[in-house]
Image (tube, rainbow, N blue to C red):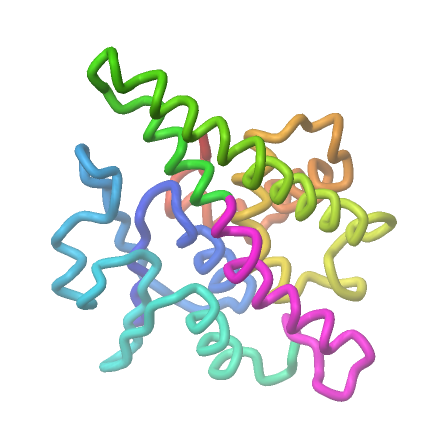
Amino acid sequence: MLTLFALKQSRAYRIAWLLELLGVAYQAETLERDPNSKLAPESLRRIHPLGKSPLIQDGEQIIAESGAICEYLLAKFDAHDSYQIASDHADYWAYRQWLHYAEGSLMPLLVMTLIFRKIDATPKPFFAKPIAQKLTDGVRQSFLSPQIKLHLDYVEQQLNGKTWLVGDKITAADVMMSFPLQAASSRAPIADYPNIAAYVARIAAEPHYQQAENKLGKLTIL
C-alpha cells in the first residue's frame, strides 16, 4: 500500500487531499515536528536523504516535493483526467501555471514571513534587539509586505466569479494552491480578500479534504 509520510501542519495535507480525491488506498504516517527546530524529525532521513515532508513511498518508489508527488499520482491514478486539464484544452496553460506558481512564487514569500517572525521571537541581548528589529522591519516594509500584497491581490482577482481556479471542477491546481492560501488567509485580513477567504472555506468543506483531515488531524496554521 502507498504510504504518505506527513508532517503535522504541513504541505502534506494537500497530498492527502489528492489521494482522497483519486480514491487511492494509502497509509498516512503522521510525524511530529522536532520540538526545537519545528522541522521534520531526523528519523525522516531514513526514508529520504533530505528528511522533508511530504514524501510518498509506493513500492520501491520514493518521491519528494509536492509538485512531483502530484504529477506522479495523477499519471498513475488519474487515467481519465478527472483532476487535470487536457493539453488541448484552452485552460491547459492556466492550469500548468497554477501548478508551478504555488511553490515557485507564493510559498517562498510565506516561508520568509515565518522566518522573520521567528527572528523577532528569538531571544537577543538587549543591545541587539533594536538592530535586528530595524533590519526585519526594513525588509518587511520595502519588500516582503508589498510582494505579498501584490500576489494576494493577483490571486484574489483571478478567483473573482470562480468556484475553483481553472474551469468548473477541482483540479491539481487547487490541490497545490490550497496550502499557501490557507497559510496566507490565516494571517491576511479576511475582509481584504473575500474571494480567497471563500475559496479556502470551500476547500475546508470539501468532503475529500475533510477525509484527509480525519487522517492527519485538523489543519490549524498559525
Task: List x then y, in percent, for residue 51.
Answer: 21, 59
Q: Residue at x 44, y 51 (%)?
A: 13
Front in this rendered view, residue 173 or 209: 173
Task: List x then y, in percent, for residue 101.
Answer: 59, 62
Query: Is 105 one of the magenta-colored residues?
Result: yes
Front in this rendered view, residue 168 or 24: 168
Left or right of residue 35: residue 210: right
Task: List x then y, in percent, for residue 219.
Answer: 45, 38
Determine whether 159 is above or below 121 in the image.
below
Give the magenta-colored segment's residue range: 82-109
Left or right of residue 46: residue 8: right
Quarter of the image containing the N terminus?
A: bottom left
Q: Residue furthest top?
A: 126
Left or right of residue 72: residue 32: left
What predominant SS class does the magenta segment belong to? helix
Determine whether 198 is above or below 52 in the image.
above
Determine whether 90 is above or below 167 in the image.
below
Task: List x then y, in percent, for residue 213.
Answer: 45, 44
